[in-house]
Image: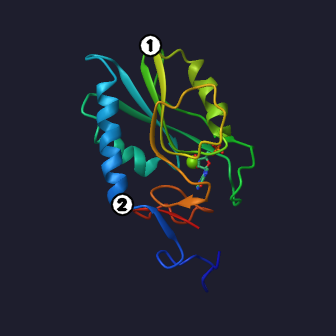
């Protein structure tokens, strides 16, 4: 990685595009449709976005779900300024919404080591949802998880990915595509 004079990577010169904005758009449309088909009419559905990384994904995704849903967020953070997960997941866990008896879909930006999922899911299950599913835009397929990830946008390479919500030390979240640094 070669930082520029301002200490940042130049957006387009040094990032390799891994998933283009157009590829993401098409895939998010498919995911939205698949989620819509998975539930029965009248199901009370809560889509729960894991911040901050999922903020763009969830905004695009919920607009492609063709059935009534509600949306809320929770926040966890595990990386700090490192590109390797510290395993120390800080949880800012405060979804306002009730989950009891509702169909909850947890939306992640990327499943890497799986530490975040392993920390967050038991806390959500304690709240007794009627059903619980996980949807992630990207999956590195490294983690052994005891919960199936029902909807996966893309299998991700092992590289460190940024853009479309994903950051490196808070940079690059705004990029409309996903690149590797
Ligand atoms: P895990 O806990 O190791 O599965 O990592 C989950 C969280 O770490 C994700 O929600 C991301 O915020 C962050 N993360 C993991 N891999 C990457 C990456 O390649 N780029 C940016 N963030 C990542
Ligand atoms: Mg994240």
Q: Considering depth in this image, is 96 or 53 the residue closer to the camera?
A: 53
**Element at badge 2?**
helix
Q: Residue 30 sits in which quadrant? A: top left
Q: Which residue is mark 2?
A: 21
Q: Residue 81 sits in which quadrant? A: bottom right
Q: Is any atom of residue 62 visible in this view?
A: no
Question: Residue 41, relative to residue 176: is it above or below?
Answer: above
Q: Considering depth in this image, is 144 or 129 the residue closer to the camera?
A: 144
Question: Residue 125, relative to residue 55: is it above or below?
Answer: above
Residue 170, given in percent of the width and then of the height, sits at 58, 61
* Ligand 1 within 8 angstroms of badge 2 C-beta: no
Residue 97, given in percent of the width and then of the height, sits at 45, 26
26 on left or right of 178: left
Q: Nearer the viewer, mark 1 or mark 2?
A: 2
Q: Which mark is residue 101?
A: 1
Q: Is any atom of residue 4 visible in this view?
A: yes
């Amino acid at each position: 990685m070669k930082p520029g004079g301002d200490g940042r990577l130049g957006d387009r010169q040094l990032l390799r595009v891994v998933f283009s904005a157009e590829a993401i758009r098409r895939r998010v449309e498919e995911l939205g449709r698949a989620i819509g088909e998975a539930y029965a009419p009248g199901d009370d559905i809560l889509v729960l976005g894991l911040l901050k990384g999922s903020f763009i994904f969830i905004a695009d995704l919920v607009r492609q779900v063709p059935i009534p849903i509600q949306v809320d967020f929770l926040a966890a953070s595990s990386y700090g300024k490192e590109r390797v997960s510290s395993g120390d997941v800080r949880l800012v866990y405060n979804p306002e919404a009730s989950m009891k008896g509702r169909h909850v879909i947890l939306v992640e930006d990327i499943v890497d080591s799986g530490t975040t999922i392993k920390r967050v899911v038991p806390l959500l299950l304690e709240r007794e949802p009627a059903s619980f599913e996980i949807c992630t835009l990207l999956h590195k397929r490294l983690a052994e998880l005891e919960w199936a990830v029902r909807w996966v946008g893309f299998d991700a390479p092992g590289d460190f990915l940024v853009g479309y919500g994903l950051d490196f030390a808070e940079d690059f979240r705004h990029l409309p595509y996903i690149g590797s640094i």
